[in-house]
Image (tube, rainbow, N blue to C red):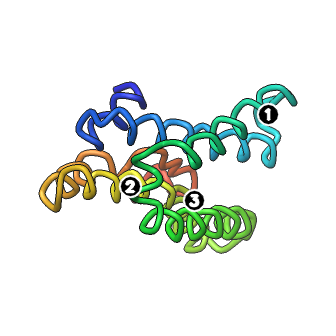
């Protein structure tokens, strides 16, 4: 499934919610690419994604209405991302496995959006269907620990 389909399904097709979450996801991936240096990011690409995110935060009606519930989650997601990179760099297998989960905490923003757009049952369906998205599982052995 295309990641845009995932976002649209979470927000039940709400075009404002979808456009906000799309750029939020692009921003998160762009910043991660810059830090990890695993994909080149040009100054123009960074400027575009930052400008788009700022515009979405300032003019998107869905983001403005729901910002109070989303901002604390976004701040926590950024802390989880930093902590995950620190834990992934250790030799502690438990920390590495935990880091694989909380590095993608920003997905909780998508599930919060599912709740906002569709209520408890819709969020429950989305978490059941998409909770695993972006797991690396690179720290698990091939012996069925997954």
Identify the mark at residue 103; answer none if there is no mark.
3
Mark 2–mark 3 contact, CB under 8 Å?
Answer: no
Q: Is residue 54 left or right of residue 56?
A: right
Left or right? Give the position of 117 relative to 92. left
Q: Identify the mark nearer the N-term, 2 or 3.
A: 3
Q: In the rendering, at what x and y percent does residue 124 appear?
A: 19, 58
Pair 1/2: label in front = 1
**Residue 135 or 107: which is nearer the viewer?**
107
Q: Is residue 141 above or below residue 46?
A: below
Instruction: Check if mark 1's residue and mark 2's residue have beta carbons within 8 Å.
Output: no
Q: Which residue is mark 2?
A: 146
Splitting the image into 4 quarters, where does residue 127 fall? Answer: bottom left
- Secondary structure beneath dot 3 equals loop
User: Measuring 60% from the left and 67% from the top, which residue is drawn there?
Assistant: 75
Label 1: which residue?
A: 47
Instruction: Identify the image quadrant of residue 100.
Output: bottom right
Name the spot of residue 64 as percent of width and height, x first: 47, 54
Residue 91, image x and y in percent? 71, 70
Q: Secondary structure at mark 1?
A: helix
Foreground of the two, 47 or 42: 47
Residue visible at 48% across and 49% down?
Answer: 135
């Amino acid at each position: 499934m295309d990641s845009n389909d995932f976002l649209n399904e979470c927000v039940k097709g709400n075009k404002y919610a979808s456009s906000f979450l799309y750029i939020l996801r692009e921003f998160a991936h762009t910043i991660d690419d810059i830090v990890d240096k695993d994909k080149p990011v040009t100054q123009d690409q960074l400027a575009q994604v930052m400008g788009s995110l700022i515009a979405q935060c300032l003019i998107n009606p869905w983001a403005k209405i729901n910002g109070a519930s989303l901002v604390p989650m976004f701040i926590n997601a950024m802390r989880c991302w930093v902590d995950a990179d620190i834990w992934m760099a250790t030799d502690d297998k438990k920390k590495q496995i935990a880091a694989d989960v909380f590095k993608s905490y920003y997905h909780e923003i998508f599930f919060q959006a599912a709740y906002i757009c569709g209520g408890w049952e819709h969020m429950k369906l989305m978490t059941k269907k998409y909770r695993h998205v972006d797991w690396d599982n690179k720290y698990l052995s091939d012996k069925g620990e997954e």
